[in-house]
Image: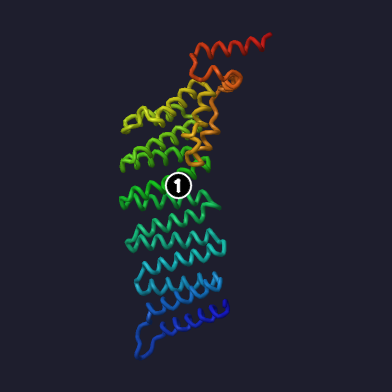
């Protein structure tokens, strides 16, 4: 079967070469037909799992589409060449071809196709190179944003933000999340603004910037429905616990369903959040859960005094 497909591929290549020849009666090469034959050859090689030869055939197809001024089809062929590199597990080369195709899509006036190709490229490279995936998702988001397709843009920004958190590039993640939140506000998806505020708080607290975290919540009070919402109350409680070094209060919020069922990268931030200097209170709360986190500050102080008393006996 494979041998038959390879033979068919070579027959198509021979036909393509014939289309390119000129004579006394044929002054110009037939680039369109040559490109078509190379496309057929590429499919035959692909079906025979001869991916390197398939890639070469797609590049030839692209070359003759370019000669024929059919840039969209040339870009498609180059993208396919990239997919043949993917089949050979040569991901960096695959991404290079796809990015080249995207530039051609842009030149051809089809930015949506470019953005979708960049998104596909991001998915391909994500398992092996998170940094490159972030770059591709952000580029795709930028293309959609320029076309005023904010719903598609914000979805891709969200992918980039989550990967920045995974990479522990938290300063950049904070900037990306603010951009996401602004975009959701623009398209009036306020529940998603609430979720992004929660993500922002977690990122800023991991950065050790309580002031920035608090500011995100305060700014969100202007969002319709935020004040008094479950998200708002949870963040106010978390910030209070963090500020007062009440580890138990912060722990309860961070392990609540609201935060545990966020996107995995943010859920991990929640459960790994440490409250500065809050170690003692959590231990005491565990020993006497009936006291709760809602007790008066003086009661908490008395508990701490008891701890010291025990230690000085």
Q: Is residue 260 visible?
A: yes
> Mark 1 falls on what kind of element?
helix
Q: Residues within 10 Å of mark 1 (few under 14, many from 20)?
A: some
Q: Quadrant of residue 199?
A: top left
- The picture places residue 33, in percent across and down from the top left corner, at 39, 79
Which residue matches tag 1? 159
Q: Quadrant of residue 212?
A: top left
Which residue lies at the image location 41% right of the left edge and 30% below the top edge? 230
Tell me: residue 68, above or below residue 143: below
Badge count: 1
Which residue lies at the image location 49% right of the left edge and 38% below the top edge? 261
Q: How is the image coloured?
A: rainbow
Quadrant in which the C terminus appears: top right
Which residue lies at the image location 39% right of the left edge and 86% below the top edge? 22
| Extreme residue toward the front, this view | 290
Q: Nearer the viewer, residue 92 or 202?
A: 202
Tell me: residue 30, above or below residue 65: below
Q: Nearer the viewer, residue 58 or 244?
A: 244
Q: Is residue 207 visible?
A: no
In the image, 68: left or right of 46? Answer: left
- The picture places residue 245, in percent across and down from the top left corner, at 52, 21
- The picture places residue 132, in percent across and down from the top left corner, at 50, 51
Q: Nearer the viewer, residue 308 or 103?
A: 308
Q: Quadrant of residue 29?
A: bottom left
| Extreme residue toward the bottom, this view | 24
- The picture places residue 40, in percent across and down from the top left corner, at 46, 76
In the image, 136: left or right of 310? Answer: left
Which residue lies at the image location 42% right of the left edge and 63% below the top edge? 101
């Amino acid at each position: 079967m494979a041998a038959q497909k390879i033979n068919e591929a070579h027959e198509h290549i021979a036909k393509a070469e014939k289309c390119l020849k000129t004579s006394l009666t044929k002054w110009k090469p037939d680039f369109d037909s040559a490109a078509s034959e190379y496309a057929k050859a590429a499919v035959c090689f692909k079906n025979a799992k001869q991916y390197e030869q398939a890639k070469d055939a797609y590049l030839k197809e692209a070359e003759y589409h370019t000669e024929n001024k059919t840039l969209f089809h040339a870009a498609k062929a180059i993208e396919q060449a990239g997919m043949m590199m993917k089949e050979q597990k040569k991901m960096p080369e695959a991404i290079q071809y796809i990015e080249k195709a995207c530039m051609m899509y842009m030149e051809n006036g089809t930015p949506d196709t470019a953005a979708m190709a960049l998104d596909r490229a991001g998915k391909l490279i994500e398992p092996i190179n998170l940094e490159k995936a972030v770059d591709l998702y952000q580029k795709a988001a930028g293309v959609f944003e320029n076309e005023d397709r904010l719903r598609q843009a914000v979805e891709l920004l969200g992918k980039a933000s989550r990967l920045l958190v995974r990479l522990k590039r938290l300063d950049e993640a904070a900037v990306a999340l603010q951009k996401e939140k602004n975009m959701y506000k623009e398209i009036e998806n306020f529940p998603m603004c609430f979720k992004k505020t929660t993500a922002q708080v977690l990122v800023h607290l991991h950065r050790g910037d309580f002031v920035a975290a608090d500011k995100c919540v305060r700014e969100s009070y202007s969002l319709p429905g935020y004040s008094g919402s479950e998200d708002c109350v949870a963040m106010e409680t978390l910030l209070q616990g963090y500020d007062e070094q009440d580890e138990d209060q912060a722990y309860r919020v961070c392990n609540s369903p609201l935060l545990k069922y966020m996107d995995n990268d943010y859920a991990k931030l929640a459960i790994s959040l440490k409250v500065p200097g809050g170690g003692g209170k959590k231990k005491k709360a565990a020993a006497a859960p009936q006291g709760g986190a809602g007790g008066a500050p003086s009661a908490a102080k008395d508990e701490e005094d008891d701890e010291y008393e025990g230690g000085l006996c």
